[in-house]
Image (cartoon, helix red, strand yellow):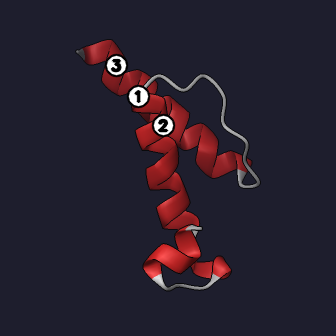
Amino acid sequence: MLNSLLKISHEDSLNATSIIHTIALLNGSKLLRVHDVKEAMECIKLVQYYKDIL
């Protein structure tokens, strides 16, 4: 889906995926289905930090 929207290859979609994860988390998502666990955990930690300082 992101690949088609951005006209990029699957291999180049990690940045877009991280952005979508961040948007989902900021909008209340409690669950992410991921393949790139390290990067998803970084998104979760950054969003949690952001929410904690607000």
Q: Few, some or many C-alpha atoms within 10 Å of disc 3 (few <14, some 14-19, many ≥20)? A: few
Alpha carbon of mark 2 to alpha carbon of mark 3: how far?
Answer: 13 Å
Q: Find numbered disc 3 in the image and state the secondary structure of the residue it sits on.
A: helix
Q: Amino acid at mark 3?
A: Lys
Tell me which numbered mark, 3 or 1, is placed earlier along the sequence.
1
Residue 30: image quadrant is top right
**Residue 42 position in % (x across, y down):** 54, 41
Residue that badge 3 annotates: 51
Q: Find numbered disc 2 in the image and state the secondary structure of the residue it sits on.
A: helix
Eyeballing the image, is 28 above or below 3? Answer: above
Eyeballing the image, is 40 above or below 30? Answer: below
Residue that badge 2 annotates: 24
Alpha carbon of mark 1 to alpha carbon of mark 2: how far?
Answer: 5 Å
Left or right of 25, for residue 10: right
Residue that badge 1 annotates: 27
**Residue 16 position in % (x across, y down):** 48, 63
Circle 2 or circle 3, nearest the eye: 2
Residue 22: image quadrant is top left
Residue 53: assigned label: none
* Residue depicted at 48% across the width and 37% down the height: 24
* Residue depicted at 57% across the width and 76% down the height: 3
Instruction: Please report contact status of discs 1 and 2: CB closer than 8 Å, yes or no.
Output: yes
